[in-house]
Amino acid sequence: MAKRILIDGFVKPGFEHVLETFRSNLSSGLERGGSFAAYYRGQMVVHVWGGYSDLDSRQPWKKDTLSCFFSSTKAVCAFVIAHLVDRGHLDYNERVSKYWPEFAQNGKENITLEQLVSLQAGLVTLDDYKLSEVRDDPKGLEKKLAAQKPFWNPGEAFGYHPVTFALYLDQVVSHADPKHRNIAQYFKEEIANPFDIEFYIGLPKHLHYRAARVVLTRKMDMEQFAKTFKGDLNIFMETAKNPKDFRDVRRVNDPDCAELPVGSTHGFGGADAMAKFCGILANGGEHEGQFLLSRELIKRFEKPIVKGYDINYGLDHWWSLGTTLFGVKEGNGPVKFIFGHGGFGGQWIGVDTHYKVGYAYTTGFCDPTASYSGVADQRLESLYHAIYDCIRRIENVIMPRTNYFLYSEYEKATNAKNKL
């Protein structure tokens, strides 16, 4: 008997290869439950979903399934900051303490907003905290954030901020916003609602029945991880201690945890919502007469600020204004950048202003190896190549295309070329 493949969705003519790739991933067992979507030149061209949102109960993935994007949510928060910059409420060159005076203590007096969003502030964790304090003791958490001493001299290194990234941005938003909203409220009222994007920073409990269950596809090989680790082990171990109530990502399966408005990790939505969001940015920041961000500010996200292995997790990337970048070279042309952010286990959202495409992938079947080892997630990578095969065919582009997903790949290629 043939294996039943649970798959549904929509593809515009010319993008059938994406559907075929997604179907192949499901039939081979590579994909067990997830969704992929893309917007091209302002229009949805792909939204496919399949497999299970909860394998134990045999609950199929549906069009309206809400999935946790984990750290991809950081990019959403970075764009909230950009939204405030665009409207004159923030300036990347200003010190954070201009907006939040209590921040100016324990060596943080001169940290600029640009340094904070580009991971240079050294605020990778707090000495002792719980994630639930976001809801249960926000004033106490604010004091801890303000008092924290950086783990290195700000501006002298950069390192991944797994949870504290958006905790700090949340404070910046609430202090700079004339209405003093937190980052989740600001995103909902200024971006999600006006642009009809169903994405939640903190999943309301009454919607938890739509959430995909998070499971791990394998255990992290810590021995192999240690062999290839490029960060500072002491800083990494300090980061791993906190928050004390979120040491296992599967905690988001608990509605009490999922509802926390944490912009670093707790973004819930569908691939279609995030693809629409990214598609608007890729198409110049305008959608149906409304402007999300100015073209000038969007272009700033394509300019690397720091690059190489970060001092905390040892991730090998370019970083911009709160987003990661990877380089693409076609023919003999210059390297151009796609910006976005990955999320634990395989999630990704991406913005490509050159081809005017925004895309997103999400799954509940999380592979920790893909998140931290520098090895690309095969599910995402196959869909990435499929969408660009379709677009390049439509635009009649025949030049060879080279992707530099890691900064070290680009550095190696550049050094080899210089030796010729």
Image (cartoon, rainbow, N blue to C red):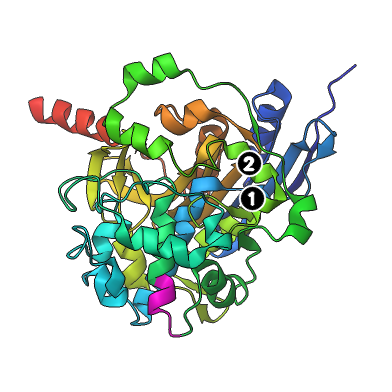
Kind of residue indicated by mark 2: Arg
Q: In the image shown, does 9 or 223 lie closer to the viewer?
A: 223
Q: Which residue is mark 2?
A: 251
Identify the residue at image location x=47%, y=33%. 371
User: Magenta part mainly helix, strand or loop?
Assistant: helix
Looking at the image, the residue that sits furthest to the bottom is 178
Residue at the image point whose x is 45% and y is 63% from the top: 140
Image location (x, y in percent) of residue 224:
40, 15
Callout 1 touching callout 2 (CB < 8 Å): yes
Q: Which residue is mark 1?
A: 257
Mark 1–mark 2 Cα distance, whole angstroms, equals: 6 Å
Residue 30 lies, in percent from the top left, at 64, 25
Q: Quadrant of residue 362?
A: top right
> What residue sits 50% from the left and 37% below the top?
385
User: At which x and y percent is residue 405?
Assistant: 37, 36
| Secondary structure of the residue carrying numbered label 1 | helix
